Structures are given as structure tokens and as C-alpha cells.
């Protein structure tokens, strides 16, 4: 049981907020805006120069591998960490240096922070009690949250008498009843089993829609980010790699890193030289890769494995100039491992990357709007390290 941290959402709602008052705030102005946020330790780790804008009522995921700075970014937004540079505006007010309790937000932590001496019901209602909400309203909100998160019958228990998953649901329920318009969640489902994770995920989304909450949701699980969010902020080594709606992130990744982080299985990468495009890396999604007779098509590979998934199969293929080659096909593929197979990479479905910088050159059906919404590294910033495919390190 971690030290109980009174979550920001448990503090009384402020009557006045620090910072300048919003003057003539446009209706479509971002609800949360971070500009050039930096927080590092001895010049390393954390986040550097992160900028993002979150619309009111939006569901935004912060996605990226372990250690890329997701929790640091969330803690900066929450006021639990102080930036060394940059600014944070919430609902039009400068909150860069405002205390957590003044930011009007609730938070659900990776490690549930509950008060061990309080019952489930008291933990859930703590914030409302501090705000002196009427008894009837408290009872109604409690009943609603308890039912929503499947905590019926546990109201009188202490956190020590709950499983990890139950504690996490109490933490979610507490955020739900806090009534704050902004909810920050740091891997809130990591302690739940797969089935519960799916159902609580749907509950969070339904709740967010119903209450019009603005949610910032940290996860390293791309499926979770893609299925829940309006916008995904993909991070890499403390910086923003790409900001885009899930469909645009999937169809038009700005880099090899983004292409390989998103999608299950991820985009395959082929050395351009094998396709008559030296200096490039060609990406292809599994559902776009077509199988043909050996010798036909653009490449000839070898079947390594066939995974039957019921409605379809995944054919895992190896080729000396490629990594991650997988074809999604309907039904049972009827291919034995070791079989030679032709591969077609339709031109319109290829995503082209510069082999040296790893940045995308052009993608399939890239709509202008999606590109405009994406935030790549700014001019002058150091290009990411090159990531040409290395077949000898192929994960096939
Ligand atoms: N208080 C701290 N002191 C020193 N380094 C820190 C501190 N907090 C975070 N870091 C470093 O900053 C980097 C980002 O950490 P952060 O917790 O934000 O990552 P994360 O993306 O949330 O990872 P995970 O998915 O594992 O939770 C890591 O390298 C971490 O070691
Ligand atoms: Mg984290």
C-alpha cells in the first residue's frame, strides 16, 4: 500500500484561481495547453520541450515506451512536478506555478493512492465531503460510482481488505465523483485482469462522454490509446514524436518509430533498395500486404509461421531485406512454414521513410488536415537517429 497522497481532486474547489483571468476566451480554445514544457534531472530523463493542446471534452492519450516521460508530463500538468521551462494553461488561465489543488482536476495514479484508515465509501466521497456537498448528492454519486465500477458490497471495507484491482476501481470511483472537469489518469487499468480492463475501459469512455470530462490518459499500450482516444500524443525519449487522431497516426506515421509503435502487429519495414528505391525504407501494414505465387509480386519471401485467429490468419514471412513482415489474410491461410511466397506491396499503400533520418516522406491517403495536426520536431531540432531496417536483428 503506497503512502496515501491526497489526490489533487480531493482538495476543495478553489473559489478564485491564480493566474490571469481568461479574457474573451474563444469557445474552441484549448482546455489544456502546454508550451515548451521541460523537466529533467541532471539534464536527462523526464521531458524536454513538450507542447500540446487538448480540446475541452477531449480524450487524449499520452502513449510511449517505458521511461519516455509519460508520467513526468502528467505530473507536470497535475502540479505535482515543477517545470524548468515552459508554461501550462488550463481553461485559459496560467497554471504553470499553481498548486495542484488549485488546478480543478482529479487524478488516478498508476499506484492507487487511497487513505488506508478510511472505508471504500469514505475514500470515494472524500473530496465531496471536503467540499461540503449535500448528503443526498453524496449518496447519489456514491451509488452511481459504486455501481459503475462494480464495487457493490465493498463500501464498508478498508483498502487493505481489497484486491489490487478493487483498489484501482475505488481510485477511479473517487475521480468520477470529484466533479472536476479535467481528469488525469496514469495507467489506471494496469492492475486489472484483461476482462476487467476491457469493461472498465468502456466505462471510463462512456463516463467521459456523459460528463463531458476532459481526460488525459497515460498508457504504454497502443491498443488502449488507439481505441479510447480522440487524439494520441506519441512520445519518445522525453519528446513528442507525433500528435494525431488514432486513424491518422495509423495511416500516416511521421517516422519509423511511430509506424512500428502503433498497430498490432506493427508496420513491416522493407529496405528500399530491394524495391528499387535506394535511400528509403518502405513501410507496409499487414492488411495491405498481398500474397502471390513465388516469383510474382515485388518480393519473394518465405513463410515462417501461420497464426490462425479464427476469422483470419496472420502469415509471418521472412525476407533478408525486411523486418516484421506479416500478412493478415481471411480464413485459414493453408500455407506451410518454409513455403516460398510472392509478396505484393501496392504502391498506394506504401509509406516511405528516409533511410537516414527515419522520417516519413509521404504516406498513403495522407489528408492535409491530419498532417497539419501532427506535431513533428521543429526546424533546427536534432533529427532522430537513423533506423534503417537491420535484417540481421529481425524479430521475425
Ligand atoms: N524524480 C526523478 N529523478 C530522476 N529521474 C527521474 C525522476 N522521475 C523520472 N525520472 C526519469 O525520467 C524518465 C521518464 O520517467 P517517467 O516516469 O516519466 O516515464 P514513463 O514514460 O512514465 O515510464 P513508465 O511507462 O515506465 O511508467 C525516466 O528515465 C526516469 O528514470
Ligand atoms: Mg509512468
Image: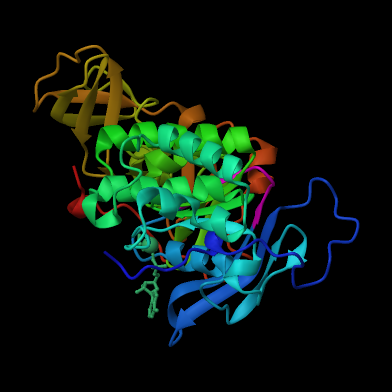
x, y percent for residue 368? 69, 39
Question: Does 381 sit above or below residue 64?
Answer: below
Pick the residue in front: 357 or 326: 326
Instruction: Tell me the quarter of the picture where residue 227 sits.
Output: top left
x, y percent for residue 158? 29, 54
Residue lying at the far right of the rendered structure: 24
Question: Does 370 sit above or below residue 128?
Answer: above
Residue 176 lies left or right of residue 158; in this view the side is right
x, y percent for residue 155? 35, 43
Residue in view at x 63 percent, y 65 percent? 378
Ligand 2 occupies quarter: bottom left
Residue 61 among magenta residues:
yes
Residue 93 lies left or right of residue 238; in this view the side is right
Q: Is residue 255 visible?
A: no
Residue lying at the far front of the rendered structure: 135
Q: Which residues are magenta?
A: 53-62
Amino acid at each position: 500500500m503506497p503512502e496515501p497522497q491526497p489526490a489533487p481532486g480531493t482538495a476543495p474547489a478553489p473559489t478564485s484561481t491564480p493566474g490571469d483571468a481568461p479574457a474573451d476566451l474563444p469557445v474552441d480554445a484549448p482546455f489544456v495547453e502546454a508550451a515548451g514544457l521541460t523537466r529533467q534531472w541532471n539534464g536527462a530523463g523526464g521531458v524536454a520541450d513538450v507542447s500540446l493542446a487538448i480540446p475541452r471534452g477531449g480524450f487524449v492519450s499520452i502513449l510511449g515506451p517505458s521511461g519516455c516521460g509519460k508520467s513526468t508530463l502528467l505530473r507536470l500538468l497535475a502540479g505535482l512536478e515543477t517545470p524548468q521551462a515552459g508554461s501550462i494553461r488550463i481553461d485559459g488561465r496560467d497554471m504553470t506555478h499553481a498548486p495542484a489543488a488549485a488546478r480543478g482536476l482529479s487524478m488516478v495514479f498508476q499506484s492507487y493512492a487511497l487513505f488506508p484508515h478510511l472505508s471504500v465509501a469514505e475514500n470515494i466521497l472524500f473530496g465531496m465531503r471536503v467540499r461540503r456537498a449535500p448528503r443526498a448528492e453524496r449518496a447519489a454519486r456514491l451509488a452511481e460510482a459504486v455501481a459503475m465500477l462494480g464495487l457493490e458490497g465493498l463500501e464498508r471495507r478498508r483498502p487493505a481488505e481489497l484486491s489490487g484491482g478493487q483498489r484501482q476501481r475505488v481510485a477511479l470511483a473517487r475521480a468520477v465523483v470529484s466533479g472536476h472537469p479535467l481528469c488525469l489518469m496514469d495507467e489506471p487499468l494496469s492492475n486489472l485482469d484483461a476482462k476487467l480492463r476491457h469493461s472498465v475501459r468502456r466505462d471510463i469512455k462512456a463516463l467521459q462522454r456523459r460528463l463531458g470530462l476532459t481526460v488525459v490518459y497515460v498508457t504504454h499500450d497502443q491498443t488502449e490509446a488507439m481505441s479510447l482516444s480522440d487524439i494520441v500524443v506519441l512520445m519518445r525519449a522525453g519528446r513528442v514524436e507525433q500528435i494525431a487522431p488514432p486513424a491518422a497516426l495509423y495511416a500516416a506515421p511521421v517516422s519509423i518509430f511511430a509506424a512500428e509503435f502503433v498497430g498490432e502487429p506493427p508496420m513491416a519495414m522493407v529496405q528500399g533498395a530491394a524495391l528499387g528505391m535506394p535511400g528509403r525504407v518502405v513501410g507496409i501494414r499487414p492488411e495491405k500486404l498481398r500474397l502471390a505465387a513465388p516469383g510474382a509480386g515485388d518480393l519473394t519471401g518465405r513463410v515462417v509461421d501461420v497464426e490462425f485467429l479464427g476469422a483470419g490468419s496472420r502469415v509471418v514471412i521472412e525476407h533478408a531485406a525486411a523486418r516484421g513482415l506479416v500478412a493478415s489474410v481471411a480464413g485459414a491461410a493453408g500455407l506451410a512454414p518454409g513455403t516460398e511466397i510472392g509478396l505484393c506491396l501496392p504502391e498506394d499503400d506504401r509509406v516511405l521513410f528516409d533511410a537516414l533520418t527515419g522520417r516519413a516522406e509521404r504516406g498513403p491517403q495522407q489528408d492535409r488536415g491530419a498532417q497539419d495536426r501532427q506535431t513533428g520536431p521543429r526546424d533546427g531540432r536534432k533529427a532522430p537517429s537513423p533506423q534503417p531496417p537491420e535484417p540481421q536483428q529481425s524479430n521475425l
